[in-house]
Amino acid sequence: MTRFRKTITMRKSWWKISAVLIILYTIIYGFINKTPELPIIHQSIRNLYFHVPMWMSMMLLFLLSFINSLLYLSKMNFKWHRNAVIFAQIGLFFGCLGMATGMEWATFTWGQPWSNDPKQTGSALTMLIYFAYLVLNNSIKDPKKSGTISAVYNIFGFVLMFPLIYVLPSMTESLHPGSGGNAGFNLYAADGNMRLVFYPAVIGWFTIGLWISTLFIRLDRLQNHLYS
Amino acid sequence: MKFSLLLNANNITQEDSITSIFESYDKLGVVILVLSTIFIGLMIMLFLLDKRIKKMEDKVESKF
């Protein structure tokens, strides 16, 4: 028992079961708890428990991808690069979920799913940058070259995410809460009831993202072990 | 455009669709049940995949 001993935490079940229970709690309590009665947004405010945690999970997974790319560049061990790619892939999956829940929310509150809002556009650009990262990684045949170029690109991509999602939308007029002078979620979630669901939802969805990532990482290690 | 201005501009009829779900416990129960079932189904699939990977890891460990 040597090679896979390192993955022992990944193999444990308690944190996975906890994440599932937390999300079940947010689904059930999120639909029956009391929310502030706000005009237009009405009951769709409950989408806060799904939409925002998806984006936060995406950003945390991109952060892990960024850290793994840094580790690859400093240690030149290819496993860090493979981990970075997997975290970026799962982060993108959560980004797609965040985009879908956001567009659904926008249909009910803004009247249409896409209104070229700066934050929507910034999020779409961020996702395109990461899709390009995956394409770049697959397009270079030499693994060493591919690893180094992709890692450098990943670092730039992660740093670019902040101006695209936070800085630029806050400088222009925006429909999105928290941008362009609009009230943020602090105001919506000022109600303690919402915080009781929102924070566990962020933890739960991120843990699910982490779990999916570890499954892919373990599969990748197995493949590597069998074919090396 | 500010959020509040937009809301007034778009004459939203969201009250009819989403809010109606929260008017009766029957509808709300069905929504919660459907969402929970889909989620649990997906999580069971993940657990099965996890178990399978664990088995493969153990098999590889025993070989080498």
Image: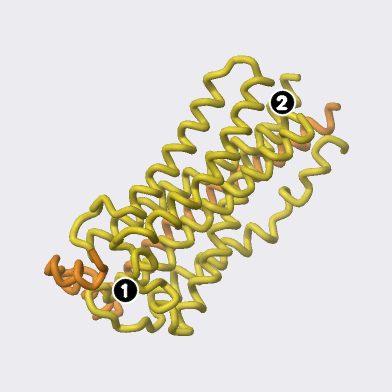
Cα gap from disc 2 to disc 1, whole angstroms? 48 Å
Q: Amino acid at mark 2?
A: Asn
Query: Are discs 2 and 1 located on one and the same chain?
Result: no
Where is residue A217 shown, x and y percent of the image? Answer: 66, 38
* Quadrant where the image shows the C terminus of chain A: top right
Q: Residue at coordinates 57% horizontally, 18% vertically from top-left?
A: A140
Q: Of helix, strand and loop, which one carries label 1?
A: helix
Q: Amino acid at mark 1?
A: Leu
Q: Considering depth in this image, is A74 or A7 the residue closer to the camera?
A: A74
Q: Residue under label 2, please give it.
A: A224
Chain whose colour in the figure is yellow: A
Q: Residue under label 1, please give it.
A: B28
Q: In screen coordinates, is A52 left or right of A120?
A: right
- Against A155, is B24 above or below? below
Q: Considering depth in this image, is A41 or A225 the residue closer to the camera?
A: A41
Q: Considering depth in this image, is A142 or A22 the residue closer to the camera?
A: A142
* Quadrant where the image shows the N terminus of chain A: top right
Density class for disc 2 (Cα within 10 Å; few <14, some 14-19, many ≥20) is few
Chain B, colour shown: orange
- Against A158, is A172 above or below? below
